[in-house]
Amino acid sequence: MNVSYQWLNEYIEVTDLTAREIAEQMTRGGIEIDVVESLNKGVSGVVVGYVVSKEKHPDADKLNVCQVDVGTGENLQIVCGARNVDAGQKVPVAVIGAVLPGDFKIKRAKLRGVESQGMICSAKELGLNDKLLPKEQQEGILVLPAETPVGQSIGITLGIDDEVLELDLTPNRSDCLSMLGVAYEVAALTGREVKLPETSVMHSADQASAHISVSIEAAELCSHYSARYIRGVKVAPSPQWLQNRLIAAGVRPINNVVDVTNYVMLEYGQPLHAFDAAKVAGGRIVVRQAKPGETLTTLDDQERTLEEQMLVIADAEKAIALAGVMGGANSEVSADTTDILLESARFDGSTVRKTSRQLGLRSESSARFEKEVDPGRVIAALNRAAYLLEQCADGHVTEGIVEAITSKMEPAVVQVALNKINQYLGTNLSKLEVEAIFLRLGFEGSIDESGVFTITVPTRRGDITRDVDLIEEVARLYGYDNIPTTPIEGSTTPGALTKPQAIRRDLRKRLTDSGLNEVISYSFTGPERTKLFPALTNGASPIRLAMPMSEDRSVLRTSLLPQLLEMAVYNRNRKNENIAVFELGSVFHTEEEVLTHLPQEKHRFALLLVGNAVQAQWNRKAEAYNFYHAKGVVETIVNTLGISGLVRFEAAQPEGFHPGRTAAVLLHTEAGTVTLGYVGQLHPTLQHESDLPDTYVAELDLAPLYEHADFAIKYKTLPRYPAMERDIAVVVDTAVEAGRLMETARETAGGLLESIRIFDIYTGEKLGAGKKSVALSLVYRHAERTLTDEEVTELHGVVIAKIEQTFGAELRK
């Protein structure tokens, strides 16, 4: 909403305040002012001149030599090249010494040998937005109305010695979509009175009801429709003052009839529409919904097919307007119009909004109806427009208003207690102070002995329906800066991360420091992808979305790996072939087929490796990712969390994973053994379907890790006594897991075995079919003394014997 400072001053005396001071008060009162813009773009010394005569330039076909009276007693000789300049015109003249926008100074000059004592200006040269001017004034020099006084400053004539406040309104403050609404707001902020515009008319003896009738068929969509009948109008350009007001508000003048309806809409916030009465069949107005297949050509010359829920204004034969949106070309006011049917109504805002959006047709009228117009201004705006048509278009207003009312809206009555106002605002306002604020707002009311105000809210303030709305008004008018500050009291505790949050943050750092990239994928996936890794979903049913964006994103994910596969395929299709990524995210599980309870949200870690871990260089070959890279990442996680002693890896064959290159990750605790997840290679079939080479993945449940993670650093003294190392190589069946050999050795050796590692695995024809050689290195140490060679040999022999007995192993020679 653009508000002219000079126009605002017609309703409330604000000459002692600048436009910027008003903007500051309104902003502090809750109505934000984005910009205060001056309409004068740097024009000075430009006056109204009268072209006395025009003659052709003796040496230039396209130039004219004009004698111009600017009210100084002597005519000025001005050379002008505009095609539309002519004798008898009133025009803007920049005299010698005048300044135009861009700091362009007018000097005495000679054009083709003829002296020019000024410049006749166009609208653009005066800094006007010519798109807002009538079409006939957009080309050539600006021709002013014949009644414009000669010598008058162009700033006064065109109203550019003015400033415009651009309001940034929130949806609840639709009352300020009008000049009167802004005037009431400024009056409340400054404690002044509002002067209402003149609305009285000179009625003719003729009755409006003899010419028109009104009926409402869609009662739920239109609560009030009123009309006046005005005869003998003369369609012509509007007076300059009216055009100036519209241009300042950003509205292009058209003719006096249309301009009056737009002017009153801006003034009262009540949209109006003028029909050519001769084009309204039978003089009958019917407010109804559109008929199936009905069409209407609107004022923008677009034929529109209407839908049945759209509200239209119709005559006895056809639709003639889209209610609240735009009129029809079949009832448009034209230069031949003499009689006017003037409409003022209250349409349902939601219906207007739907029609406007469906047709892609936004207008100043629809914007106001969408936010609900003031029902108390329907008749007042109609009378104001009739008055202006009488003044500006020589119209004769017939007596009476023809109207139909389906429901009346009474002013809201809201109660609020004085102690509640003070309690909410932290103030100590008295009854008289609050009463004064309500009076400034124009709210009538009373207060009872218990301190409860009963306020009758004017219909223009439809946003006030509850006691807290009144409290907000008190706060605005009292001044937010005047509300006392209250220190926050009470004990405070420093913020901190929860244990799960700290773990996730630490894991992100460790993994990214290790060269992996973190990804964040959709929580939504397709139903088929939830079936890829059943061992990770624990039989959970996919949870469907009520309104999915597509079938591919129609259920909540039950595993992280399917999204990582999509990401890998997407990247490799774009030649990003070496991928090492992880994700820390949530999956959603439920055992219900039909969801009646909230699903379980589980935190998971997932990993995907594909391509080369090491790129080929001159001194080394490329190294592809393998199972042990993925296993190493999982070991990094358990080491970071301090639970490496609790985690074991066992061969597993879950669906979706390679049957020979996959391990289950097990957490051994006093309460039992928990399967955290799996690490391994994708199943070859799944790799082939995804067009991926060997791809290694892992997914772990984080909840058990949260519970058992131990960040405490454990210190121990450096060993004082030497260790003794023994190596053995045993031949066992290929089915025997090397990890089981290590576990047996640990259990047998007890506390004297400090460490054990595998340093070689060999298979070959010399060992025989189904056999392999596993070489182990064992380190023995006693914490309090030096072990003897005999002790170590004896203990080592016991370990060998146990391995031979348990696994049928043979020492390799």
Image: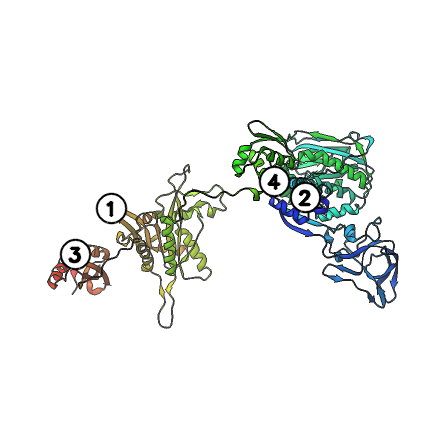
Which residue lies under the disc numbered 3? 749
Which residue lies under the disc numbered 4? 477
Q: Are marks 3 and 4 in contact (CB under 8 Å)?
A: no
Which quadrant: the N terminus? top right
Alpha-carbon span between mark 3 and mark 4? 86 Å
Q: Quadrant of residue 59?
A: bottom right
Q: How is the image coloured?
A: rainbow
x 62%, y 40%: residue: 173
Kindly tell me whether residue 808 is visible in this rendering.
no
Alpha-carbon span between mark 2 and mark 4? 30 Å
The location of residue 83, given as percent across then percent down, is 82, 58
Q: Which of the marked residues, 3 or 1, is nearer the chain's N terminus?
A: 1
Q: Which mark is residue 38?
A: none
Q: Which of the marked residues, 2 or 4, is nearer the chain's N terminus?
A: 2
Alpha-carbon span between mark 4 and mark 1? 68 Å
The location of residue 533, given as percent across then percent down, is 36, 49
Relative height, residue 813 to residue 292 (above, below): below
Relative height, residue 610 to residue 471 (above, below): below
Residues 541 and 388: in front is: 388
Amino acid identity at mark 1: Glu
Left or right: residue 144 versus residue 683 is: right
Numbered-mark total: 4
Which residue lies under the disc numbered 2? 364
Q: Residues within 10 Å of mark 2 (few under 14, many from 20)?
A: some
Which residue lies under the disc numbered 1? 670
The location of residue 41, given as percent across then percent down, is 72, 56
